[in-house]
């Protein structure tokens, strides 16, 4: 599962897990145990374990195929770009052109098996770079918006792209060789 604020898809139905996971912002899900980290010092984590013995299985991740996720990401990116251009609320960030120019290139520092589908690698790279662009946009909120209505329209334009990015990353990371 790739965590996002408020998104607990993929978590097993274990009492107390979802609230603690939401508070921590991350969860490690294994076959027999779920671990939730809690910082207790500058470089120290304490892990809370939730055994999965007898717990109902987690619902399958909503991901679809790599091609479907790739297409959805392309559509969301185009829709967001058109809407933001129409709103004329963009601000210049020197990092964005490089991120967008490298959308199709592999991401450094990500170790995946040698037989990973090239589409999964491409989807992972595009998703990670677009996630970085979205992080810049969120850090710059409300962008060039002057009114509440403009800020809401900007957020509404970015929301589907954010969802598509998360689902693309999930699909790429969950790809299983056939």
Image: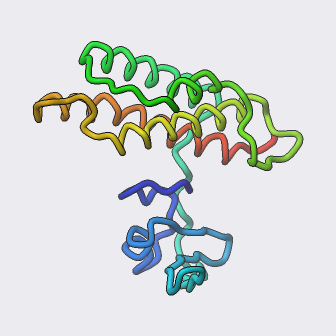
* Relative side of 143 to 116, left or right: left
Q: Which quadrant would the C terminus be assigned to in this image?
A: top right
List x then y, in percent, for residue 30. 66, 70
- Answer with the quarter of the image where residue 136 lies: top left
User: Depth check: 42 or 18 in front?
Assistant: 42
List x then y, in percent, for residue 106. 74, 33
Q: Does 36 sit above or below residue 68?
A: below
List x then y, in percent, for residue 113. 85, 47
Q: How is the image coloured?
A: rainbow
How many numbered circles are shown? Answer: 0
List x then y, in percent, for residue 80. 37, 23
Tell me what residue is drawn at x 65 percent, y 38 percent.
Answer: 124
* Relative side of 147 to 21, left or right: left
Tell me what residue is drawn at x 79 percent, y 49 percent.
Answer: 111
Q: Does 143 sit above or below residue 110?
A: above
Furthest-front residue in this view:
94
Q: Which quadrant would the N terminus be assigned to in this image?
A: bottom right
- Answer with the quarter of the image where residue 104 lies: top right
- Answer with the quarter of the image where residue 24 lies: bottom left
Q: Does 74 sit above or below residue 177?
A: above
Furthest-right residue in this view:
114
Tell me what residue is drawn at x 61 percent, y 41 percent.
Answer: 171
Tell me what residue is drawn at x 79 percent, y 34 percent.
Answer: 117
Q: Does 112 sit above or below residue 81?
A: below
């Amino acid at each position: 599962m790739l965590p996002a604020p408020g998104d607990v898809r993929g978590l097993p139905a274990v009492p107390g897990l979802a609230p603690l996971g939401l508070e921590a912002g991350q969860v490690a899900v294994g076959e027999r145990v779920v671990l939730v980290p809690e910082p207790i010092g500058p470089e120290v984590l304490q892990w809370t374990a939730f055994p999965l013995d007898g717990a109902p299985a987690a619902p399958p991740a909503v991901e679809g195929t790599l091609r479907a996720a790739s297409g959805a990401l392309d559509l969301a990116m185009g829709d967001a770009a058109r809407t933001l251009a129409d709103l004329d609320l963009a601000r210049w960030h020197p990092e964005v052109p490089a991120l967008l120019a490298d959308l199709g290139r592999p991401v450094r520092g990500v170790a995946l098996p040698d037989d990973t589908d090239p589409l999964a690698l491409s989807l992972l790279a595009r998703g990670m770079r677009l996630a970085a662009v979205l992080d810049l946009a969120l850090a710059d909120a409300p962008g060039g918006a002057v009114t509440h209505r403009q800020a809401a329209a900007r957020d509404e334009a970015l929301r589907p792209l954010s969802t598509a990015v998360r689902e693309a990353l999930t699909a790429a990371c969950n790809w299983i060789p056939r």
